[in-house]
Image: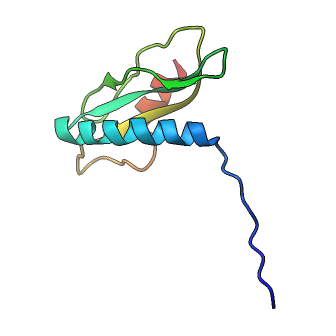
């Protein structure tokens, strides 16, 4: 009996995954250290170069990311919830997070 395992490609390209991991690991530590939420965007430019916007420092449970230049396209947002309140829910984006990203 032979077992075959399908090669399942990642939903994201390797460079996107690498950039996200590098930026988010640093920001998560900073978020815990300062007990604040940090937020921002992962963006791509006209040459398909991927980068992250400078992180915006938010409050304990909300963050509205600063605008990014119009020549960039945001393909993901992030919200690092370092501050934890017993009343909060941190596994899903908050209503405030979603509204801020939509603006």
Q: Position of residue 19 (x, y in %)?
A: 49, 36
- Location of residue 6 by image quarter: bottom right
Residue occupying image coordinates x 39% and y 22%: 64
Residue that lies at the very extreme toward the right in this rendered image? 1
Q: Position of residue 25 (x, y in %)?
A: 36, 42
Residue occupying image coordinates x 25% and y 36%: 30
What color scheme is it?
rainbow
Q: Quadrant of the N terminus?
A: bottom right
Q: Nearer the viewer, residue 87 or 38?
A: 38
Residue occupying image coordinates x 46% and y 13%: 67
Q: Position of residue 45 (x, y in %)?
A: 61, 17
Q: In this rendering, is residue 47 above or below 8?
A: above
Residue that lies at the very extreme toward the top in this rendered image? 70
- Location of residue 35 by image quarter: top left
Q: In this rendering, is residue 22 above or below 47?
A: below
Residue that lies at the very extreme toward the bottom in this rendered image? 1
Q: Nearer the viewer, residue 96 or 31?
A: 31
Q: Nearer the viewer, residue 60 or 29?
A: 29
Q: Position of residue 16 (x, y in %)?
A: 57, 37
How many marks the image carries: the answer is 0
């Amino acid at each position: 009996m032979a077992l075959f395992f399908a090669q399942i490609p990642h939903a994201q390209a390797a460079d996107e995954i690498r950039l996200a991991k590098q930026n988010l690991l640093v920001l998560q530590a900073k978020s815990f250290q300062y007990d604040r939420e940090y937020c921002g965007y992962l963006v791509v430019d006209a040459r398909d170069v991927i980068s992250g916007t400078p992180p915006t420092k938010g409050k304990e449970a909300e963050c509205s990311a600063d605008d990014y230049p119009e020549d960039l396209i945001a393909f993901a947002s992030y919200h690092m919830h370092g501050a934890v309140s017993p009343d909060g829910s941190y596994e899903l984006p908050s209503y405030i997070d979603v509204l801020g990203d939509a603006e």
